[in-house]
Amino acid sequence: MRAQETAANDFKLAPQPDESGDSNCTTIMHTNKMPPNGDNGVTNSGPLNEMPHPAINLHIASNASPIEMSAIRIIESDEAVLAGALARIAAREGSIVVRGLGHRLPREVTDFVRDAMGAEPRPPPGIVGKLPQITEFGATPRARRSTKESFENADPPEIIATKAYRNADFLNSEQARNIRILCEYEETKQRLESVPVTATVMFFGSARSKHLAVHTRFVNEAQQIIASGTPGSEVVKQAEQELVRLASIEWMCDFMDKIRELSRRVTSWSVDRATNCGAVGQALPVYVCTGGGPGFMEAANRGAADVEGGKSIGMGITLPFETGLNPWVSPELAFQFHYFFTRKFWMSFHMKALVVAPGGMGTLDELFELLTLKQTGKIQNSFPVVLFGKAFWEGCINWQTLKEFGVCSPSDVDNLFFTDDVDEAFQFIVSALE
């Protein structure tokens, strides 16, 4: 049946209860194709599975008014009738959602709806813009209670499944831990190779250290809070505790500038070496690498950034008190890890020299792990180790006791380089790398 042949009396729109008794519905019947019993279907009050003629049962839910529900029944309808019926509903309600109720919609119907009712005849002007809002859903449990023989040849609706590599719940689960570990290994490997990075000077040190200007600002802020606050109040107590903490780390301010300068010198040497060397293989730069955090790590990254053309690596890790990497890390060489052991692996993999500034538990952990790998030959045992801050390192750890009690070889301690001087540290590193 073509558009021009579809008269108004070919289908009817009228309130009609569905089999559940819901009177807030619209029943559409193609009256030119009557059921064998002569019933035009509009006044049929029996259940759909008792209707003797094939029917397409649709459920229309208004997007504009979710409470209003309409049931559309179309008997042996062609596309023109379906288009006209849905167009009128869309004109009234603005947009419609089609749900299969009594069966799984035949593919020709679902394809037709998905095509935004683009078949001839086209809906009246003003309706076309609303029709793309029509969406189709699969069958409901009522399909199992409806006339099955009428739709024995109907294609079942498609099931859309999530691909495993896009399943966030799985990828963040305990079962996918091995995949996450592999990602931290392989993604880092690919990015380092793309630069390429083949040699690094690793800088470790406390995240609590601060440049003198920053330290002074924090001290002034704490003093202002104490001066303007109520003595004994919680705010004043916290400020007093902060002053004590700042006083305890003030000695590291001087080392911040020295670490920054040492990193600048190493980076400048590397850039000049790469520029002046003719052989490409020998011209590959040596990159400063840090844990990407604040304190001495930030000082080292900043020193590398002070050099024109200088770049540095930051290998951060998610911690509750660190929200991201320091701003001096080169963006293309910024990494964020979840697992400490994958982070440590890549920190050590390309390392050719180690500089360790004063630090706490994390710094000591990283230092002794690398010394153990060096001692056991798991990594090259010739890389230079600079312990920057002589008084701290000699007072923090009794290295001579380790030798005297025979728990390590004398060379394990004797090969460590203790210094407070940037020039000495730079020469010690460069002489080992050249």
Image: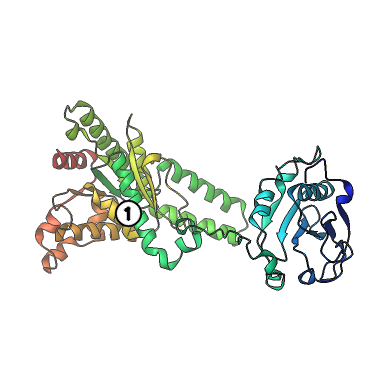
Pick the residue in front: 74 or 286.
74
Q: Is residue 224 above or below residue 141?
A: above
- Residue 70 percent across, percent down from the top left: 81, 59
User: For residue 40, which quarter of the picture?
Assistant: bottom right
State the residue at coordinates (24%, 36%): 285
Pick the residue in front: 360 or 393.
360
As shown in the figure, which amino acid type bears the numbered disc 1? Tyr
Q: Is residue 162 left or right of residue 310?
A: right
Q: Is residue 214 visible?
A: yes
State the residue at coordinates (51%, 58%): 162
Q: Residue furthest front?
A: 36
- Residue 186 percent across, percent down from the top left: 33, 52
Q: Is residue 172 visible?
A: no
Q: Circle 1 sits in a helix, a strand or a loop, which is it? A: helix
Report the quarter where the C terminus lies: top left
Pick the residue in front: 416 or 374.
374
- Residue 123 percent across, percent down from the top left: 78, 41
User: For residue 101, which quarter of the picture?
Assistant: bottom right
State the residue at coordinates (27%, 54%): 392
Residue on which the image places disc 1? 185
Specify few, some or many for label 1: CA neighbours under 10 Å numbering under 14, 14-19, or 20 or more: some
- Residue 320 percent across, percent down from the top left: 47, 59
What scheme was used to colour the molecule? rainbow
Q: How many marks?
A: 1
